[in-house]
Amino acid sequence: MSPITMLISVIGYFALLLIIARFTSKNSNNSSFFTGNRQSPWFVVAFGMIGASLSGVTLISIPGEVGNSGFEYFQLVMGYLLGYAVIAFVLMPLYYKLNLVSIYSYLGQRFGNPAYKTGAIFFLISQTIGASFRLFLAAMVLQITFFAHYGIPFSITVAVTIILIWLYTYKGGIKTIVWTDTLQTFFMLLAVILTIIVIIRNLHPEPGTVLSSLRESHLTRVFNWDWRSPNHFVKQFLSGAFIAIVMTGLDQNMMQKNLTCRSLRDAQKNMVTFSLILIPVNLIFLTMGALMYLFVQQSGLTFTDAHGFMLDLTSNKFIHTDALYPLLSMNYLGTLASVVFIIGVIAAAFSSADSAIAALTTSFCIDILNFRNFDNIQKQRIRFWVHVIASIIVLLTILAFEALNNTSVINAVFTMAGYTYGPLLGLYSFGLFTHLKPAKKLIPVIALISPALTWYIGNHSEEWFNGYKFGFELLLVNGILTFTGLFLISRKSVIALNHFTSTR
């Protein structure tokens, strides 16, 4: 596809987003930006959340990883169902009962201001890293397909990408994002389905041969029962459950959309519907990955390190697997595949990054700056500049990741989540399942020590535990360490003492 064709496609798509933003941001105010005036239809939120949760990481990185781990990622997806059930029937009733705008306000009510600020800061770190990793993929694709042809550096590509997002979100905030995410989810799923059709046609199969080839291939294996492997089923299933809880239920970005629903019942219907839809959607993404590798094998394609993606003969593993989908769609599958790929990647990246930047703005304004103490004019001005600064920080983080990147983005996202969301998991679990009151001033200390210990354990697990290698379950380890630390610095609450004395 020529750079001009690509540019026209991007401009057309972006114009559509601006039209939606224009209509949804009319008469917007701070309430619209932060909560959507709690008027979002639940089914619109559910469909839009698919794109926000999957993002460009799913579109590019998960299919690329199929070459090394088959369908083992689906073990993680199975665990999601358990995690989303906890969110719908444990966390959401709490959030709606307390009428929260920022979910970290709960930590303030339960433990005091130090815990509140600690939770918000860990979210800000987590969300900045996660949004940056996801946007990195979109910027990389735009760089390869357009900007590189004109000698424009990657930093400019990233800046343009973030400016485009900022333009359609700065006014309407979450009220606009709920609707733009719905459009972007549609285009992302359409891109995957059309890509699968194009690949199958390029394989020139006899009837039924594609399915039989996939069944016979190692590419579609699902279960891993090697207990030393980080992809062992139990590890992946439990990791999936807790990843869902922390990256959705304890994440202001994802919960901000749910809190725009009209009622708790609507929010729960949204979450249940969303979780059930994710199962077939993830299978479609994995199938596309298997078909891509089948196409590479049957076409006899070989790649050099100049293309990024390649087979490392030493480890017999594919490296830089994030580059496979862009390579095939832009060079081997025809113009239609190129166009739908570009639109799909932009839609996927924007659907996660736009709400992430809005959530960063919300959390910093409400949790860190105590936004409620300002008048409306001050709130508008502060919100504007926080939105700008959040965008700049994401830009700088993307450039740092680009300089250091040597792994697939999906692995990077979940690995970092294990360190940054672990303290949140421990804090919320302690608050929900105990009546104890930790010493307020020591809570931030525990939240810092736990990730450090988790990292140390993860780096030495093979020598300490007879070859056992931690995977994404480091998140659970981090949460347990935080919970244990909070227990050690706790005293019994007045409620617990009163209950004890009244029963004697």
Image (spheres, helix red, strand yellow):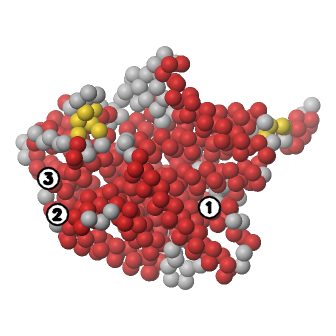
* First along the sequence among labels 3 and 1: 3
* First along the sequence among labels 2 and 3: 2
Quadrant in which the N terminus appears: bottom left
Kind of residue at disc 1: Ser
Helix, strand or loop under label 1: helix
Cβ atoms at labels 3 and 1 below 8 Å apart: no
Circle number at residue 332: 3
In this image, 447 relative to 145: left or right? right
Q: Quadrant of residue 374?
A: bottom right
Kind of residue at disc 2: Met
Q: Quadrant of residue 214?
A: top left
Helix, strand or loop under label 2: loop
- Residue ID at (59%, 78%): 29
For mark 1, does the 10 Å Cα neighbourhood hold few (<14), some (14 to 19), or many (20 or more) residues?
Answer: many
Q: Which residue is mark 2?
A: 1
Helix, strand or loop under label 3: loop
Q: Which residue is mark 1?
A: 363
- Is 399 above or below relative to 283? below
Kind of residue at disc 3: Tyr
In the rendering, at what x and y percent does residue 10 appear? 29, 70
In the rendering, at what x and y percent does residue 169 appear? 48, 72
Residue 315 appears anywhere in the view: yes
Q: CA distance from mark 2 to mark 1?
A: 41 Å
Q: CA distance from mark 3 to mark 1?
A: 44 Å
